[in-house]
Amino acid sequence: MTDHSLGISLMVNGEAVAERVEPRTTLVDFLRDGLGLTGSHVGCEHGVCGACTVRVNGEIVRGCLMLAVQCDGASVETIEGISDSGEVADLQTAFEQRNALQCGFCTPGMIAAAQDLLKRAKDNKRVPSRDEIREHISGNYCRCTGYHAIVDAVEAVAQARAGARK
Ligand code: FES
Ligand code: FES
């Protein structure tokens, strides 16, 4: 059988990775199956649910809508790296304290999306409203919580981080 795989080199959670991948391999499948980074989940595989959210060059993307070969030369961060860096420790604590997760399937993507909003809010020197939080996580589906607790957790962290900046 003809080998159509392509060589890619990228940074994943700060570490250099060089692998061969099939052109059709999605980024999330590459991360999960190729690198064992199973914190990014696969739900709809159609760009709808947000379970596969990861960062590429600092921007959140759907890992199921991007091909691994498109990440050649890029810097990719998964929930494992985002978590290990400590940057979302307060969000993780708030999610736990406010019961913002039940099965946890949506949680890695939800945390990545929430952190994206909070970073933008910091850059703009403002605290996002509940409506803005809802809008920002509207592409991340949760089947369990009803979203209120998630919005509560993100809002609490938004206010705490803003308070810490004063
Ligand atoms: S699995 Fe990617 S958006 Fe649902
Ligand atoms: S906690 Fe189960 S899908 Fe969100």
Image (tube, helix red, strand yellow):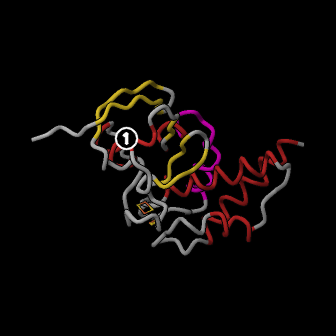
Left or right: where 86 falls relative to 29: right
SS of the residue under disc 1:
loop
Which is nearer the eye, 65 or 13?
65
Residue 99 position in % (x across, y down): 55, 63
- Taking the image in four quarters, ligand 1 sits in the one at bottom left
At 69% from the left edge and 64% from the top edge, which residue is drawn? Answer: 133
At 81% from the left edge and 56% from the top edge, which residue is drawn? Answer: 127
Give the quarter of the figure containing the C terminus.
top right
Residue 155 position in % (x across, y down): 72, 60
Q: Main secondary structure of the magenta part?
A: helix
Residue 104 position in % (x across, y down): 44, 59
Mark 1 residue crowding within 10 angstroms, few (<14) / some (14–19) / many (20+): some
Give the quarter of the figure containing the N terminus.
top left
Left or right: where 141 falls relative to 160: left
Write down the quadrant of residue 7 in the picture. Answer: top left
Q: Which residue is mark 1?
A: 37
Q: Is residue 96 above or below residue 21?
A: below
Q: Is residue 106 magenta?
A: no
- Write down the region rendered in magenta: 83-97
Q: Is residue 88 magenta?
A: yes
Residue 9 position in % (x across, y down): 41, 28
Q: Is residue 58 above or below residue 127?
A: above
At 51% from the left edge and 35% from the top edge, which residue is drawn? Answer: 74
Left or right: where 75 falls relative to 38: right
Considering every residue shown, the one lying at the far right of the view is: 166
Left or right: where 121 falls relative to 8: right
Considering every residue shown, the one lying at the far left of the view is: 1
